[in-house]
Image: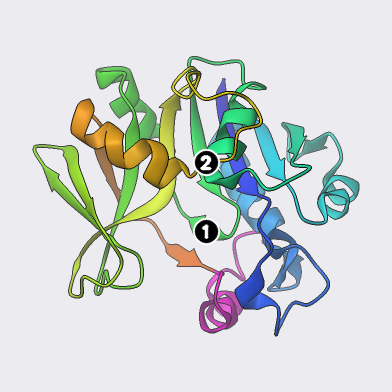
């Protein structure tokens, strides 16, 4: 059974000017909450269980979706205090059942090649970072890759074309067990940056449609680019 964690607990500070009264994943895109578009896409790709990691205005999300959406079981974890990306993933992993889980950001749409991604997992059984080629990596930070594995991260500001972390991963369910439940930490800096130097971490380069709605310009662009996903 394909299982996913969706990180949907952010405050959406950069979107406040255009979406003032909703959690960022519920921001309307082409007439639907963005999270509906994301979950519809996951259901079509064969996912059957999703753990939604919530924080700010969590009750809005739970009330809208309930326990099931598009044939997928929905499970919720809710932060009482912000846990960072690492703490949120650690808490959500405790509610997962499978050997591995796909982790995605709740403010990013990625038309993920899920079958090929899981085939890579079946071949290697090691953490996978999903990457995306972009024209300018400065806003995101750059992945340095060789022989199908991530060797290091570069901080934001390195300009020019290259691969970025698309904010999507395939992780073994026990990968964060060394971190106590309820401890706040950054998955990217406290775990991932160290992991790529200490163990094999595969890269999967997605060619699917990628758009991050976290800033107003891209949120406006998503209104037309994602209009057909739920059709």
Comparing 173 with 225, the one in front is 173
* Label 2 crowd (10 A; few <14 / some 14-19 / many >=20): some
Comparing 54 with 104, the one in front is 54
Instruction: Residue under label 1, please give it.
Output: 109
Residue range highlighted in magenta: 213-231
Q: Measure how far apart labels 2 and 1 are at the Cα level.
A: 24 Å
Q: Does residue 137 appear in the picture of this structure?
A: yes
Q: In this view, which residue lies farthest toward the left? A: 147
Residue at x-position 56% and y-position 74%: 222
Residue at x-position 48% and y-position 45%: 186
Q: In the rendering, which numbered label is found on residue 15?
A: none
* Label 1 crowd (10 A; few <14 / some 14-19 / many >=20): many
Q: Quadrant of residue 146?
A: top left
Residue at x-position 19% and y-position 46%: 152
Residue at x-position 53% and y-position 74%: 225
Residue 224 colored magenta? yes
Of marks 2 and 1, which one's residue comes earlier in the chain?
1
Quarter of the rendering occupied by the C terminus: bottom right
Instruction: Residue under label 2, please give it.
Output: 185
Q: Circle 1 sits in a helix, a strand or a loop, which is it?
A: strand
How are the residues colored? rainbow
Q: Nearer the viewer, mark 2 or mark 1?
A: 2
Residue 15 colored magenta? no
The reply, left or right, for residue 204 in relation to residue 229 is: left
Q: Quadrant of residue 60?
A: bottom right
Residue 18 appears at what percent x and percent y?
71, 83
Determine contact: label 2, label 1, CB under 8 Å.
no
Quarter of the rendering occupied by the N terminus: top right
Residue 114 appears at what percent x and percent y?
43, 38
Q: Circle 2 sits in a helix, a strand or a loop, which is it?
A: loop
Residue 151 appears at what percent x and percent y?
16, 41
Position of 131 relative to 97 (above/below): below
């Amino acid at each position: 059974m394909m299982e996913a964690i969706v990180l949907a607990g952010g405050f959406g500070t950069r979107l406040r000017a255009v979406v003032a009264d909703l959690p960022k994943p519920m921001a309307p895109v082409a007439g639907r909450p963005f999270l509906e578009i994301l979950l519809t896409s996951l259901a079509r790709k064969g996912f059957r269980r999703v753990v939604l990691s919530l924080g700010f205005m969590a009750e809005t999300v739970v009330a809208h979706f309930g326990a099931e959406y598009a044939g997928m079981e929905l499970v919720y974890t809710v932060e009482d205090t912000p846990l960072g990306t690492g703490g949120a993933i650690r808490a959500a992993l405790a509610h997962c059942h499978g050997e591995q889980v796909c982790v995605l950001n709740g403010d990013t749409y990625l038309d993920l090649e899920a079958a090929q991604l899981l085939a890579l997992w079946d071949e290697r059984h090691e953490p996978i970072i999903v990457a995306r080629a972009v024209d300018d990596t400065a806003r995101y930070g750059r992945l340095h890759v060789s022989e199908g594995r991530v060797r290091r991260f570069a901080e934001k500001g390195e300009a020019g074309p290259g691969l970025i972390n698309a904010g999507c991963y395939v992780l073994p369910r026990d990968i964060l067990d060394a971190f106590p439940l309820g401890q706040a930490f950054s998955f990217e800096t406290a775990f991932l940056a160290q992991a790529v130097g200490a163990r094999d971490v595969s890269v999967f380069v997605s060619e699917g449609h990628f758009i991050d709605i976290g800033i107003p310009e891209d949120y406006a662009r998503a209104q037309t680019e994602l209009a057909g996903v739920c059709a």
